[in-house]
Amino acid sequence: MDRKTDVIIIGGGQAGLATSRCLTDLGIDHLVIERGEVAQRWRAERWNSLRLLTPNWMTRLPGWSYQGRDPHGFMSRKEVTEFLTAYGADFSAPVMTHTRVLSVAHRAGAFLVATTRGNWRARSVVIATGACDVPRVPRCASAIDPSIAQVTLDSYKTSSQIARGGVLVVGASASGLQIASALQSSGCDVTLAAGRHTRVPRTYRGRDIMVWLERTGILQEKRDPARDVDTLARTHSVQLIGSPTGRSLDLAAFRAQGGRVTGRLTGAEGTRIGLGETLRQDIRSAEARMGRILRRIDQHIARHGLNAPAPGRIDPVDCPVAPAQIDLAREGIRTIIWATGYSRDYSWLHVPVLSPGGEICQQDGATPVAGLYTVGLPYMRRCNSSFIDGVGQDARAITKLIANQLGASPPKAA
């Protein structure tokens, strides 16, 4: 017979644990199903030198926050894993590890969840598998000569695994730019294929940029209802690095290291890579977006009479002359690293809630099927919905919806 619980949470990362904590506080019976260990992606699917883009003081979850001695530092991959593991242990999160979800169906008002360790019946399901599920690789990758190694974000760990020779990194948002910079510093000859991106400085007017983004309310801005879930899922992260030195990282800094920047990848055949001609336009657009953000910060400072240094000069990115194509073999490029973002794999979800692009249709985390919710998706409710800090805020809102759906009463005060 199927085992029963009120709520099944799929995913034991920050989104799933935050939701579990909120349900625990409400006294709602639930189970978290995780395919590996708690924080599995942080453990096994991120490169070794990765640090959070947000400072430690922003590492906040329901009932738990960073309490260390370096609030303005940036947690390493290992530290994030330890932080989330301690969080789950603190409230004895009911996590069933090393268990894969095979299917989720909805029949007669209940959700049927089949797993590798048996079947469950629940009144509600929360999909907390997050934004960074399956690395996105363009279709043209299959046409690339097999002599060129191809590496995805979940398998890249360190420069030592990259073959000698040149490297092409495709994608210039946070992940791609960080990896390209690290490889260039290690002695590799790196070419970065850059498309649409958002540039911001690490610090501005004496504060970390995240301080200003929070104080101005930019991080709390609600999702634009006019933007569909497929478009939101492809929103690029800002060009930032969580560096102990507080350095900024953008295309200009990468070029100063000796790296080469080209336009976006448009196709591939054999050892030839086609490149777009929009690099200059993409750089100008990024400068304009940064300008709007910084002007808003300036206005906030002036409006509230805050004591902050005058704005420093931020030099524009010099637009290089980019080739229309590259012959990888001729230029000695032996490896491509795909930093082209992530897609979501919902092949196990047999509930009619998917968009034409394969994303979950949801409004503020609630899907069209009553009782089915999401947490941790990009711009799910607000700009910061995929941040550790943001998933906690969203989890509180979603669990209130679940409590109303289940007719659960709030726990009595002690």
Image (tube, rainbow, N blue to C red):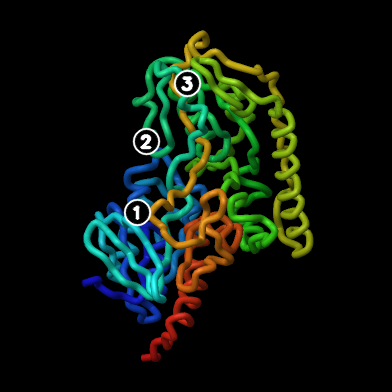
| Frontmost residue, 145 versus 34 | 145
Mark 2 and mark 1: span between their CA atoms? 16 Å
Q: Which residue is mark 2?
A: 155
Q: Are marks 1 and 3 in contact (CB under 8 Å)?
A: no
- The image position of residue 372, as x and y in percent, is 46, 68
Residue marked by disc 3: 144
Q: Quadrant of the C terminus?
A: bottom left
Secondary element under disc 1, as helix, strand or loop, is loop
Please tell me which residue is depicted at 60% across the width and 21% down the height of the picture. 274
Q: Which mark is residue 385?
A: none
Residue type indicated by callout 2: Ser
Q: What residue is shown at x 55% (from left), y 48% (from top)?
A: 357
* Of 89 and 350, the residue lying toward us: 350
The amino acid pointed to by label 1 is Ala
Identity of the residue furthest to the top in this view: 330
- Classify the position of the N terminus by image quarter: bottom left
**Please, is residue 173 above or below residue 67 in the view?**
above
Foreground of the two, 101 or 21: 101
Q: Is residue 114 visible?
A: yes
From the viewer's perspective, is 263 left or right of 69?
right
Observer-side mark, 2 or 1, equals: 2
Q: Is residue 71 above or below residue 366?
A: above
- The image shows a total of numbered marks equal to 3
Which residue in the structure is indicated by mark 1? 39
Residue 44, by quadrant, is top left
Q: Residues within 10 Å of mark 3 (few under 14, many from 20)?
A: some
Using the numbered discs, state the Cα–Cα distance from disc 2 to disc 3 in whole angstroms: 19 Å
